[in-house]
Image (cartoon, helix red, strand yellow):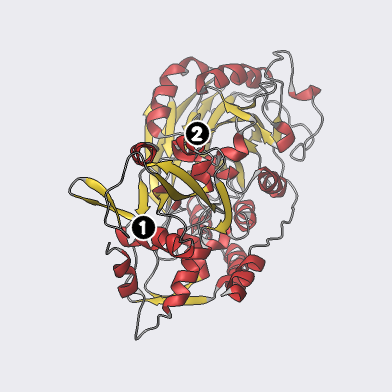
Amino acid sequence: MNLIKLTMTLLFAVLLFSACGMPINPVVPSPTDSNATASSLSPSPFSPEPSPLSTGSSTPTRFTILYTDDEHGWMSGQENSQGAAELLGLWQETYSLGQDTAVIALSGGDNWTGPAISTWFDGESMVEVMNQIGYSATAVGNHEFDFGLDVLQARIDQADFPFLSANLRLRSNGMVPIELGIQPYATLDLNGRQVGIIGLSATYTPLVANPTYLSDFEFIQYEDALREYVPLMRKDGSEIILLISHICPDELEVLSQQVSDLNISLMGGGHCHIPYARRSGDTALLASLPNLAGYAYATLVYDPASGHTTVEDLGVEANQDGHSDPHLAQIIASWQELTDAELDIEIGYLAETLTDGSQAMQHLITESWLWDYPNADIALTNLGGLRADLPAGPLTIADLINVMPFNNTLVEVHLTGSELISTLAAGRGGLAVGGMHHQGGSWVLDDSGVGLDTNQTYSVLVNDFMYAGGDGYTMLAEADPAAYQTGIDWRQSVIDWILVQDSSVNDPLDGAIRALTDP
């Protein structure tokens, strides 16, 4: 067993690489200096020779925005092999992306945390894929912070497109953290018209990202950020304003009304995995299907005489019927080979698929933690951290990473029964519970059959995301500020438990997992 753990430890070392930039021009005026302009700034990796502000043509300009959000690293696709290569082929065939200079692709963020082909390489593979597709910009989503700030900066350096967030600020000075590579907005020339693209991150990002990496940041209100920067964008020559964001459609609806006077032509959202396309006055509101299962689009017409943009067409489409782009398909295949070489290690066999979020899945995770760390009485993990099915057939380490894509460790927290009940009632999205069960309307410990005592102290395993306050579980550190950081990778216990079952086609894992649900 020590050899297995040593092997896994060695596997978790990942190399980071860098790449070059593309012709798009982020501008970073100080949020505290209304006189600052792009021309007063030092060149950035995305700063080519300045484009003319306008051709001066009075002819209306038509252009198309192709929009995805919450790609989550699913470059190979989740169903029917409809992934990034198929989406690029579809966009090339339908919209002439890459040929028609009036067509651009934008993202609402959460680019890379997901399946092993992306997560295992800290998003490096997904950024290469997005470079090849030709994205012009992405918003900063909460999951961009999953692997820490050093990794985020490495991914930004690798990208041929800027990462935008106008409301992400340093607590120390209230400025956008441009030293990390994040920009409030960018400009590009689109057939002679200057288009400004501004980004927003969810104000609740600290609740849905690991707070450990966000202690130096704050997220100001969306309207405040837009009213601060859109006038600067206009001053710097932007004729057309596009917003990309990692906020939900209902928030976009409200925001579009709050800033209707700013004449923003398009507002793209994300985070809630809700496809969406509608008009709010002359503004297109968009969000796509997640995981590259589809995209949203809007065709806009800009009239230079009036300075206004109208929405000619918009909608949401599935990623279907596209011919795979051969070059991108080869890039993805190369990353899959690397993934298989490191992670295609069979650890068990399932006769039936274990669905994401099922009770069986929840018990597999939490009960394996308690099996591996018997000092603990109870185990809790947030359901938002479980992200995929375990497919029927041979199980591999890659399959476990698909389910548990975040690089978490286990923390032992000491809570009274009363504090534990408060924890179960708090937070966002619910918890998987191991070590106790409901009986007669009360919580009962599995091992002893004794009811939970509100005055007794219990040893509780949680993941370090929760202990840091993620998903709103701030009460954990408040109750036990000296909690024990076990250093145990939260996947390792699951892998080890599966290995010990020694399952096979003739003796699948399903029965052992069902037994975990028995108190």
**Whole-percent x, y for residue 404 in the image:** 48, 57
Q: Which residue is mark 1?
A: 362
* Percent x, y of residue 281: 39, 22
Residue drawn at x 80%, y 22% as measured from the top left? 40
How would you rate the neighbour count of disc 1 (Cα within 10 Å): few for under 14, some for 14-19, many for 20 or more?
many
Residue 503 vs 195, above or below: the answer is below
Q: Hey, which quadrant is residue 213 in on the image?
A: top right
Tell me the SS state at disc 2. helix
In-front residue for pair 93/47: 47
Q: Nearer the viewer, mark 1 or mark 2?
A: 2
Of helix, strand and loop, which one carries label 1?
helix
For the N terminus, give its image quadrant: bottom right
**Residue 285 spot, x, y in % from top left:** 42, 32
Gap in angstroms between the C-alphas marked 1 and 2: 26 Å
- Check residue 184 in the rendering and tell me which mark sits there, or answer none: none
Residue at label 2? 478
Residue 283 vs 84, above or below: the answer is above
Give the quadrant of residue 176.
Answer: top right
> From the viewer's perspective, is residue 470 above or below residue 513?
above
